[in-house]
Image (cartoon, rainbow, N blue to C red):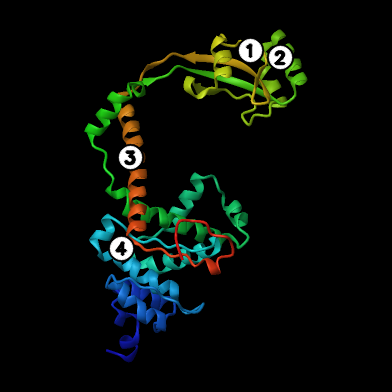
């Protein structure tokens, strides 16, 4: 064993991927706070540490926390780690550090995954370039950190959530309406904030409904600019639903006042209620049950962290008046 190995992070009991990660980051030897706390935390001891800024406190608690997530079966099934910090800026710094330490532990995000995510939310290459004041790469790093946290959530919580066929059956029995597709209507709309203009357009359309699309393009404040859109009966406010379903195809409604704006509607067609495809109904029911059970599992996960962790707040160092539940 070399002198460096004897005094390095390996000597503290860290697993090889974590030791390699800190070595790659340029950490040659543990600092005093790291040397004192890491072995104790790996041994599942309670530790209260205090050290000056820049002495490696983040690595002191983050490295053993990550190792427990990898090695401890109980931690995988129940609680993992919760880091509380007083500011958003510090939270980002700690998140970035933990992400770097965890690179060798199997929770990673590739460049193509970042590209796919940005594509899904409609952010182009050029928009990513100007999305953050720190530049494109800093913006992509923040996206990567967010995706890593989601993967950790998926692995630690959602991977243990199951929905059985029996639960789906019970859900559908209690909510039979989910097996029906409600009636719907396809509409064009003109949205106006000026009552006099709305009345003027309504008068023009009463004479010639075929002008609806061109008047909508020129005058509507709605983003669709008169394009036909389908609306389920349950999605429409009562005032609009009543006006929409009274119309015949091609017919134009009178001016409808709603939420301080003025609407003129043109019906394209209606679709009557019908039985839904059973496969699709069961799939949607399973997704809804998974969402609810996932939320409950996450609440229990956080509750376990709070129950098993004694949290103290040092009010003296906070830049605001703390009134929460945790004591000094």
Mark 1 touches mark 4? (CB < 8 Å): no
Residue indicated by mark 4? 69
Residue 152: quadrant of the picture: bottom left
Measured as percent of width and height from the top left, residue 304 is found at 32, 55
Of residues 113 and 177, the one nearer the viewer is: 177
Residue indicated by mark 1? 252
Question: Can you say which quadrant of the picture contains the N terminus?
Answer: bottom left
Dot 2 surroundings within 10 Å: few (below 14), some, or many (20 or more)? Answer: many
Distance CA(mark 2)–CA(mark 3): 47 Å
Residue 249: quadrant of the picture: top right
Q: Secondary structure at mark 2?
A: helix
Q: Earlier in the sequence, mark 2 or mark 4?
A: 4
Residue indicated by mark 3? 290
Distance CA(mark 1)–CA(mark 4): 62 Å
Q: Secondary structure at mark 4?
A: helix
Q: Secondary structure at mark 3?
A: helix
Distance CA(mark 2)–CA(mark 4): 65 Å
Of residues 208 and 327, the one nearer the viewer is: 327
Distance CA(mark 2)–CA(mark 1): 8 Å
x 50%, y 79%: residue: 52
Q: Earlier in the sequence, mark 2 or mark 1?
A: 2
Residue placed furthest toward the bottom = 3
Which mark lies nearer to you, 2 or 3? Answer: 3
Residue indicated by mark 2? 202
Q: Earlier in the sequence, mark 1 or mark 4?
A: 4
């Amino acid at each position: 064993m070399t002198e460096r190995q004897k005094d390095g992070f390996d000597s503290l009991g860290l697993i090889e991927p974590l030791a390699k990660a800190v070595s790659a980051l340029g950490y040659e030897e543990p600092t005093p706070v790291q040397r004192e706390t890491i072995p104790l935390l790996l041994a599942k001891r309670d530790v209260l540490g205090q050290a000056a800024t820049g002495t490696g406190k983040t690595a002191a608690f983050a490295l053993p926390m990550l190792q427990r997530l990898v090695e401890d079966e109980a931690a995988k099934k129940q609680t993992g780690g919760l880091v509380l910090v007083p500011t958003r800026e510090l939270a980002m710094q700690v998140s970035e550090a933990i992400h770097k330490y965890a690179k060798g532990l199997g929770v990673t995000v590739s460049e193509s995954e970042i590209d796919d995510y940005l594509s899904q939310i409609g952010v182009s290459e050029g928009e990513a370039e100007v999305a953050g004041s720190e530049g494109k790469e800093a913006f992509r790093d923040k996206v990567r950190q967010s995706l890593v946290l989601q993967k950790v959530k998926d692995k630690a919580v959602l991977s243990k959530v199951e929905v059985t066929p029996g639960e789906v059956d019970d859900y559908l029995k209690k909510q039979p309406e989910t097996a029906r597709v409600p009636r719907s209507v396809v509409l064009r709309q003109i949205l106006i904030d000026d009552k006099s203009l709305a009345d003027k357009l309504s008068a023009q359309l009463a004479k010639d409904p075929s002008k609806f699309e061109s008047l909508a393009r020129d005058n509507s404040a709605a983003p669709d600019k008169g394009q036909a859109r389908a609306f389920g009966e349950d999605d429409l406010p009562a005032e609009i639903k009543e006006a929409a379903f009274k119309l015949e195809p091609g017919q134009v409604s009178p001016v409808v006042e709603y939420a301080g704006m003025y609407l003129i509607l043109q019906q394209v067609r209606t679709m009557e209620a019908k039985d839904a495809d059973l496969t699709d109904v069961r799939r949607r029911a399973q997704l809804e049950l998974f969402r609810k059970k996932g939320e409950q599992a996450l609440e229990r996960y956080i509750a376990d962290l709070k129950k098993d962790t004694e949290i103290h707040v040092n009010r003296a160092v906070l830049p605001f008046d703390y009134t929460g539940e945790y004591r000094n």
